[in-house]
Every structure is written in C-alpha cells, then in structure tokens.
Amino acid sequence: MKHEAAPGSRRKRQFYFANRDLLVMAVLSGIGGVLSTYVGYLGNLLNRIFGVPFGAGQFVAGLHVFWILLAAGLVRRPGAATIAGLLKGVVELLTGSTHGIAIVLVSLVQGLVVDLVLLLARRHVPAAYAVAGGLSAASNVIVFQLLYFSGAPLTYILFISGLAAISGCLLGGLFGSSVLDLVSEAGLLRLNAGGGAVSAKSRPRKGRPAWVKIVITAALVIAFSAGAIYYYAAIFVPPWAGPQCRVEGMVEQELSFSLSKFADREMTIEAELKGQVTYEPPREYTGVPVREILSEAAPLSEAAVLKVIATDGYEVAFELAEVMEDDLMILIQEDDSLRLIAGNYEGGYWVKLVSRFLVE
C-alpha cells in the first residue's frame, strides 16, 4: 500500500542539511577561505601589470565565489551557498585577510546572491551558475564601495563591477559547473537532487569529450596550486607573526626589525592622502623615517631603487636617492600592522601591511 507524504514534509526535507552536506560546506569553505588570500595576491599582480593600484584584480574575482558555487552545486539545498559564504569569510578573517572583519560581510553577501539566483532559476544548469557567479562576484565591489569608497565615481564602480561580473561568470559559474559535471561523471560525490535541481547524470551529455574537460581542469588546478604553494612559502606573512619588517637586497647589513627598534628616531609629520578613489584629509602621523631605517642597513653605492612590499604581494617602487632625502616618508604601526606614509606621493604609494623593503 502506497502512503502519501504528509503536507509540508517535502519542504522540510528540502531545507534539511545532512552530515554529508555540512561536511562538504565546511571543507570547501575552509579551502576557499585560505586560497582567497592567494587570489588577492593574484589581483595585486594584475594591478601591477596594468599599472594601476587597484581594479584590474577584478579579473580574478570569480575565483573567490568558485568555492561557494561548488558548495551550492554539491549540496543543492537553499541556504547552502549562504552558509558556505559565511564560513569562508570567517576563515579568511582568521587567516589574515587584509580586509579585516569586512570580508565576513562580503562573503556572506556573495553566498546570499548565489542562493537567490539558484532559487529563482529552480534548475542547477550552466546558465544559472554563470548568472549566479557574475552577480555574486560583482556584489563584492558594491559592498566594498558602500563600506570604504562611497565617494567613488559611478562610472568607476560600474566598470570594475563589470570586470568582476565577467570573471564571476567564467571563473566562478561556468568553470564551477564544469567541475561539478566532472565530479558527477567520475562518481566521486553524489549530487543531491533537492531544491528543484536536476542531477547532472540525468541530463543528456553533449559537447567536447570528457577527457578534454579533465585535462583542462587538471591543468588549471595544478597551476593554481603551484602558485598558491609558492605564495604561502615565499611571500605570505601570517598575521600572528606580529608587525615585523625586513630590509634586504643590495645592503651591507640585512635587517629584521619591529618599529620599537627605532623608537628614539620617531618623528611626527602632517600628510594628506590623495588617491584616485580614496581621500584622507591632512592629519598627523607618528612613525620612523624610512631613510633612518635604510641608513641602518647601509645600501650599497650601486643601489638605485627601493621596493616596498606588503604581505599580500602589493608593491611600489621609489627612486632610492629620493627616499634618502624624503622628510615625509615614514613607517607607522596601524592596527597591528605596518603602513607606509608617503606624503610626497599619491595614495597608491601609501602601502598597508608592509613586510619588506627590497633595495635594488
């Protein structure tokens, strides 16, 4: 005898997260949270290539939401992306995100956007993932503008939002959908059929052979993993290491120091930050002149350039001779990190999270 399901039982099951679902969300959020710091480093590399202090990094914004989309696609229950986004943001915060507590809100909004789009689409198909990835990646621009850059020109906001949306469609949505298809075809994980989704196994397969997708995906994963290993081994400085800085390169004596070493040489200056987007009115800053720190290391006579490098990979370059004569360039401690105040330069040269002075 066949029994009818009780009214509302289907809806209750739809929002139920099994232990397997919770494990998938936790693992993917953890991986995504740790690797998002590396994605930020990739963004800074793009900024340097294009010669701008920020904006070009939105080309890789889709990699931030890739993990959220992957969690949504494997769990396939409303709310999965939101929970994954929240957990991912917390992991980013705890592993030293340069954005501080704001990154939790950014990741949460990204997850909410993914959930909303997939709920409205009612089908887990590539087009839905592409739209979800694009809107989710673009949302980070909107949230950051509201929090920090409310005076930015509308054209600028729309432009970098567009870059983020394109990246989200390609690197987040479509790439994520392809990975989910491969996972389903290989039988590595069972895809839930909840939330109105259609299992990838039930859809007719068309297009390029599976091995082509496998090769492309494997190549991207290997390249991304190799870059991440290099970043965390050679560049990343964990936040729990404290505000330390090194002077290295073409110097007689390399230094590793905290600002307390130069406490007797502190000075106070007044400076105004004039950036392309951000602006800080004139105010006083107290710190150690960079020329004093470099004098301690004694640059070699043939050295000509000073590179100031942050923990997230961002860097700027100065003429060494000008730095040694600059009365408005100091290193200060701010929010448990070091910041370069460059009063004679535009805002893009005011580096936060300073970790290295490289003399070349």
Image: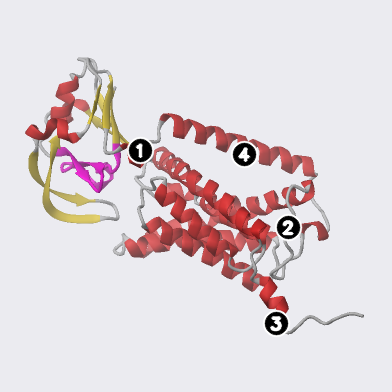
Mark 1 surroundings within 10 Å by alpha-carbon count, few (fewer than 14), some (14 through 19), many (20 or more): many
**Nearest the camera: 72 or 6?**
6
Q: How far apart are marks 1 and 2 (CA)?
A: 38 Å
Image mark for residue 220: 4
SS type, badge 1: loop
Secondary structure of residue under mark 3: loop
The front one of 9 and 126 is 9
Q: Mark 2 points at which residue?
A: 191
Furthest residue in direction right, as rendered: 1
Residue denoted by label 1: 311
Percent across and percent down for residue 299 are 20, 19
Label 1 or label 3, whichever lies nearer to me, is: 3
Where does the image place residue 225, in percent across and percent down from the top left? 56, 36
**Relative vertical location of residue 305 with respect to residue 143 in this rendering, above or below:** above
61 on left or right of 311 = right
Q: Which of marks 1 and 2 is in front?
A: 2
SS state under label 2: loop
Measured Cα–Cα span from mark 4 to mark 1 = 25 Å
**Can residue 73 be seen from the camera position used here?**
no
Q: Which of 18 and 230 is in front in this view?
A: 18
